[in-house]
Amino acid sequence: MNNLMKTISCALSNQYDASLLLNINWKDVYLKSKEHLLHHVLFDFYNDFWTQDFKQSELYIRWREEYLFHVLDHSISLYKTFEILKELELKKIEFIILKGPVVNELYRNSKTRIMNDIDILINRSDLEYVDNFFIKKSFTLIDKSDKDYVYYNSNYTKIEVHYSLFHKKHYTDFEWFQRHCFNTKVRKNNLPGYVLSEENSYIYLMLHASKHIYSTGIGLRSLYDIGAYYRLHSLKFNSIYVCETLKYFKKHIISEYILYLGNYLFRFNNQVSIEIKCSVAMELLEMINESGAYGHRGEHQIDMIYINNLRKKNVTYTKIKLFFLPLDDMRKRFGILNKYPFLLPIYWIKRGYFIFTKNNELTQRFISKKIDKPNIMSKIELLEALED
């Protein structure tokens, strides 16, 4: 484990190591932790130990301003969003809050954990009513799929409304799990609506992480969230149900590796039920470390340059440059082009559709996917290694 990871690990584990403060480059720590959405957590922890000289630096001042703004903005927007959800609850709409607010309690200061959105699960039959409710509350529908609608209002935290946990092609096979989630939902004192049972919360965190671990990335934060949640609640689990459910979804092995990496980084001592291949685990950790919270970097910088240029005058020209990337760059985004390069025009059109028809947020999310990081095993290699 390198010093950057140790610095992050100590902050999340609340274990101060004075030796780390001697020869650490705090700018590198700031940038790396920001990639993993952990820079506010680190500021909150290390602020008690930094020297007065460091607290006079430009880096510290910038870091502190970002921290204070986030804590204040987080508190206000989250409070207002919960008030909206309480109104929805008064309309007799059942909903379950997923992920973020449920794991915030695992942090020394829950306000330091960044939440870009709040995910709620509703019954599919309530979708039309819920859609009208948010529109009437001046939210804008910015994205929708065959399993969720995403609403945005600058005064609130973004709300992702799931009417299914799974895409349409999986409805038949996996719908039982969603029904079970509603049948076993529980109240949580400080939250509106319901939350998943502790077992199903853990299963959902694992399903979500294993889905995103290669493409859009999960970052070191997810290793902490899952490991800390398991440590806090696992004694109350029906371990057979949890194990068999993850096996049903074919996520049992990757889940055990995620638990193992949480132990490795944060000393959780959670029980792992399979034999771990250390070389595979370290490849997986490197992949998660490189991906950050938003996805694998690789050639991502070129996309970000273009995205930033969209604000300039030649918007159309910039967008054209953005989706007419060379074949080598497109191969890193769409693996099928390695085998069938003649399909390049089709994938230019696919990128172009998103870039010209969607807003900048969705464009950025779309074009940053599926970028392989050099010298890290591919997704296929990872799956083969895990299943051997």
Image (cartoon, grey):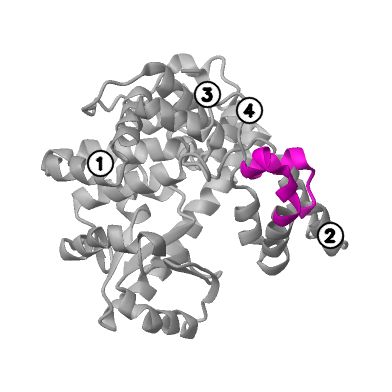
Q: Name the residue: 29% across, 58% down.
A: 173
- Left or right: where does residue 266 sit relative to residue 153? left
Q: Which callout, 4 or 3, points at the residue further toward the start of the chain?
A: 3
Q: Is residue 300 among the parts visible in the rendering?
A: no
Lower sequence index among marks 1 and 4 = 1
Q: Is residue 343 magenta?
A: yes
277 relative to 27, above or below: above
User: Mark 1 to mark 2: distance in Å?
Assistant: 50 Å
Q: Eyeballing the image, is 339 above or below 124?
A: above
Query: Disc 4 residue type?
Result: Pro
* Residue at mark 3: 4
Disc 2 residue crowd, few under 14, some 14–19, many 20+, Cα 10 Å: few
**Residue type at mark 1?**
Lys
Q: Nearer the viewer, residue 348 or 9?
A: 348
The magenta stretch is 323-346
- Neighbourhood count class around disc 4 (C-alpha, 10 Å): few under 14, some 14–19, many 20 upward: few
Image coordinates of residue 165 in percent, x first then y, are: 35, 60
Q: Which residue is mark 2?
A: 312
Distance in Å between CA atoms under marks 1 and 4: 31 Å
- Number of marks in the rendered image: 4
